[in-house]
Image (cartoon, rainbow, N blue to C red):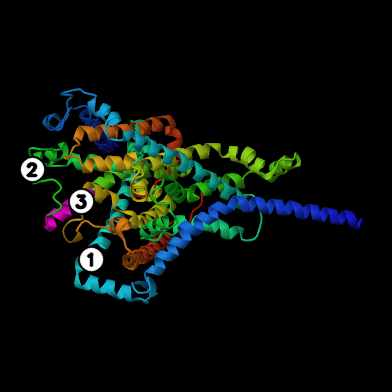
Amino acid sequence: MNVLFILFCMYAVTLLLPLVWMFINSFKSNNNEFFYDQWKFTSFTLDNYRLLFTSENNIMEMFGNTLILSLTIPTVSAFFSLCAAHAVASFEYKLKNVIFFIFLMPMFVSVAGTTPYTYKLLNDIGLFDKHIGLIIMSCGVSGFGFLMYYSVFKNISHTYIEAAMLDGAGYWRIFLQILVPQAKNLIVAQWVMGFIGTWNDFSGPYLFMPSHPTLATGVKEISDKINMGHSYPELFATIIVMLVPMLVLFFVFQKKIMTVSLGGGIKG
Amino acid sequence: MSNSGNKQKTKKKKKNLKRNLFITALLVVPMLHFLVFWLYINIRTISLAFTEWDFFSNGYKFVGIDNFIEQFRQFHERPETMNMFFNSFRAIGINLACMILAVLIGYAFSKHIRGERVFRIIFYLPSMISIVILTLCYRYMFTYNPGMLQGPGAELLRFFGMDYNGWETSLDNPDVISRLWSMISIFCVWASAGINIIMMSSAMSRIPKEITESAKLDGVGFWRELFQITIPLIMPTISVFMINSVMAVSAFYIQPMLILAGSTGPRSAYNTVGWYMFNMTPVAQNSDMPVISTVGFLLTVTVSLLVIFVRRVTDKITPDVDF
């Protein structure tokens, strides 16, 4: 146990140090100062941050694009997942089991090499390089969310719903005002996870909206041009700007996030 | 009498119609999305593997399994074309290492190791951070470029006497290639181990207290409890995790791609199938699509067979208990 404790401490340190390293060096004025001493505040300048928000570094645009995607995608996806879960959990009809199975399919079957064709399809239907294209592409039913909402709706007793119906409530009202609030905690947790996932997503915006950089793709662009007009401290400042909202979210929703996160192999 | 019965029937019919309309409204968008972005794209991708672009008719024509024969001929004549397949499967090894760490850490948490709460938060932290940031940070920490950037990680390795020269992707030297791959793998494990801890420790928290307590009374030690009680009882979770890690094979590319600044190395030593797809996506012409689909199809088939195999194995070693 003591050996484990020491190993854990070491792992924790290696996780934190790189962040400290980037943070310190985001206040250096140029590359040389950074190369010379990487662990001290040899100089303290906010120029990198100021530059980000003033120069042609369109960080405001990146911020805006990231925010648009991160706010809409989890919202729309949550709405449709709830719809699908309600349709399958609360009614009896033919093909119900088939539909249930269909929404879980993407979770269990993955075909490799579909991205190039998806790219072609988006081009053909005129949604390529537009926010709306990526949003439409990513707003399907999420298998995991669907399953969780399904089990919530399944456990809501029918008498409850019937009583509401006798009071004259329509289907939509019952769905939106009685059922959805029951899943409130789950929805918030899923939404926050979706927000974080979209905020950090790289390949989606990089491939499908190349002329609208988000923070993730922007950071990569800056790092590609690191010795051609961009400096390391500038890159680190951009990274910190991208990082801070996530850290805030994490500390606010920490409990919620850590209860719904279910892993999934290599971080991607 | 019959009149009012009819009335009731029409009322019921009307109600049914309303109900069916509502269900349809709920399902129409999710189903359309599934049909277009999952079913259509998958079927199209797979079917393209059996076609060839015909420049005269400006369309795809069916050629049977010619693409596969050509692909296997390539494997035979230029063995380096197999590298990207081989490299993709490194993801399984990485995932297994992550899983072992996650089980160990989760187990220590369930035994309330000192500082558990702080560790939980810190270990989960990388999951909040974009993979782009983590990877770039790692890349620069281990960059060794004398006179320019000498990252602290690189300095440390050299301090311990390693002959480390940074990310030299251009060298066609098996030692360099395997060293860079092990550094990439270590990075992946370092950055991903934390995400799975929660899954493992929540599986462990479902183990009934009586079992662990009676084991304690019987004098079962820390490690024996882990191997003989905890791991067998969380086998279902482990099994799901293993299947997920096999399925992750086709999506493995961001880490090597960003660490190596986009260089797939000599004879695609660092390439993966996911990376190949990523590179081909913006540039693929109609005539490239059949080849891309063939590569994807081969990987899909291999992965599916592996998933079935893993499921068989884990089913066999999972004890038949319910709790």
Magenta residues span B171-184
Q: At label 1, which amino acid type do we have?
A: Thr
Q: Which of B125 and B220 is in front in this view?
A: B125
Residue A233 screen position, x and y as percent:
20, 32
On what subunit does the disc labeled 3 rest?
B
Helix, strand or loop status at disc 2: loop
Inspect the magenta stretch and tell me whether residue B181 lies in it: yes
Q: Distance between the residues labelled 1 and 2?
A: 35 Å
Q: Distance between the residues labelled 2 and 3?
A: 18 Å
Q: Nearer the viewer, residue B163 or B68?
A: B68
Between discs 1 and 2, the one toward the N terminus = 1
On what subunit does the disc labeled 2 rest?
B
- Indicate the quadrant containing the N terminus of chain B: top left, top right, bottom left or bottom right: bottom right
Same chain shared by disc 2 and disc 3: yes
Circle 1 sits on which residue? B81
Instruction: Mark yes or no: residue B110 visible.
Output: no
- Residue at (31% x, 61% y) in the render: B284
Q: At label 3, which amino acid type do we have?
A: Ser
Residue B163 screen position, x and y as percent:
8, 46
Instruction: Give the left or right position of residue B213, taking residue B187 as reference.
Output: right
Residue B141 screen position, x and y as percent:
18, 39
Circle 3 sits on which residue? B182
Helix, strand or loop status at disc 3: helix
Inspect the magenta stretch and tell me whether residue A2 lies in it: no
Label 1: few (<14), some or many (≥20) within 10 Å?
Answer: some
Q: Which residue lies furthest to the right in this view?
A: B1
